[in-house]
Amino acid sequence: MDQQQAPRFFIHGPSPFVRLIVFSMLSLALMASDSKFSYLTPVRDALTVALQPLQVVANSPFVLYKNIGDHFTTQQALRNELDVLKKQAIFQSIQVQAMQSLKGENDQLRTLMQASKVSSQQSRLAEIMHTGRDPFSHKVIVNIGAENHVLAGQAVVDGAGVIGQVTRVFPYSSEVTLLTDKTLSIPIQVERNALRAISFGHGRDNVVNLPYLPANVDIQKGDKLVTSGIDGIYPAGLAVAMVDSVKTNVSSPFAQIIAKPMAGIQNHRQVLILSSDTENLVAKDIQQVLSADAQKQSDLKQKSEKGNDAKP
Amino acid sequence: MPNLNRKRVYLSLVAALLLQLLPFSGILLQIKPDFLLLVLLFWLLRAPNICNIGVAWTAGILMDLVTGDLFGQNALAYAITAFLAVMYQRRLILFTVLQQSVYVLLLLFVNQVILLVLKSFSGSEYFGWTYFVPSLTGIMLWYAVLHSRISFHIMARQQ
């Protein structure tokens, strides 16, 4: 059996029980301060940066494997990909032309309506480094962070639709919570009938659900859900999910609606992080509407006062 | 040579942390054993003068940092598990490999249950039965390593 050193007859330092109590108290205090107050955020960030080299070392075999795989891609595969991309480019160029005329028309209409122009949103390309360490939370880590002006709360999308939201930012990386995570909710709109609702992550099966909608709600299987844009985080009109099943239960007043995300949340490596300029735009819009209302009301008041003055 | 021992223990712990950091995904992520806890338990049972509850707690803090969990969550779980290991350390060291493995399995389960309780307090989602799979793969790894006597090579140079 294992050779054991001579047992220590004299206990050095505090007993295990005392140590347990001390360290338990310490971690309880840490947990309380981390969940309720944000005193520890700078400490945490600094320690995370200190651990960055370890992360790089741990990721290196996979990066190396990927690079080697990239190096030995066959010519045939590249040619096939090129064909697909060329076709896509042709189709999309037609769409872009249509878009531009629509955009011009839209801008003109907006100026007519005296609403602010919706500027094109800035976005930043990021690459997914690895999935989160916890298999039960739907999070991924991407390779740009505070150094690249990423902010917590920004929306993350790919070519097919919304992926999620930046939830935590480190200096050189940031954590993106996927829309299937139970803690993430997105205000959506049914494309067919403009019905507004909120989608919540399901947490387990890579789907989202729409709770708290009445059993007779007008949502069918195959309906496309897009962002409604009223939150000021996600720009309006991004694809979110496709309704997969609508069930009603006699015992529950709510319908059980399950939808599958449109974006390839499991298989994409490149994602776009949208900078939340919309927040300012929405705020501006609201302010403009409010000031216009106030102007109208004061005008009305003045008129009625004048009228009152004139009467007697 | 207490200095060398110390170095060996800490190096193996860092290696375990690196294993823990490997970017697994999918099914591998779900069955990935807690390498760091296994190495911690190994040294807690064999070198309790070097690897004590404080070391386990520090390792837990590092785990919290790399996983992005609530600060102190893994640390508390590791500290309690380490305490349970240290409490019966004198007896455990006399057990056979199989008997020891049963107790270590129990410790791995205890660690996961503590984490489960803490996570559900902080409003986490419902976990399926697959949550406990890492304990089972962990104990398989433990038994394989001890049975194949790799650990003896690690221990041999220590004396």
Image (spheres, coloured by chain):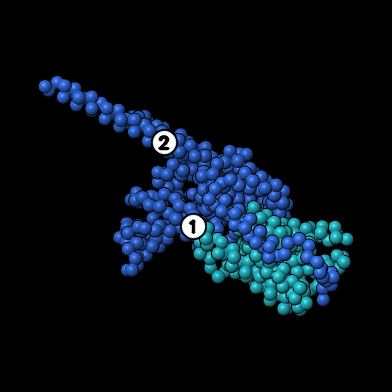
Report the quarter where the C terminus of chain B lies.
Answer: bottom right
Q: Are marks 1 and 2 in contact (CB under 8 Å)?
A: no
Relative horizontal placement of residue A312, taking residue A163 as reference (left or right): left
Residue drawn at x 44%, y 50% is A186
* Type of amino acid at the residue the image marks with label 1: Lys
Protein chain holding label 2: A
Residue drawn at x 69%, y 61% is A19
The colour chain B appears in is cyan
Protein chain holding label 1: A
Residue A252 is situated, as x and y percent measured from the top left of the image, at: 34, 65
**In this figure, which residue is indicated by the disc labeled 2?**
A283
**In this figure, which residue is indicated by the disc labeled 1?**
A182
How packed is label 2: few (under 14 Cα within 10 Å), some, or many (20 or more)?
Answer: few
The colour chain A appears in is blue
Residue A39 is situated, as x and y percent measured from the top left of the image, at: 58, 45
Relative horizontal placement of residue B99, taking residue A212 as reference (left or right): right
In three-dimensional space, the C-alpha distance between marks 1 and 2, rounded to whole angstroms, equals 28 Å
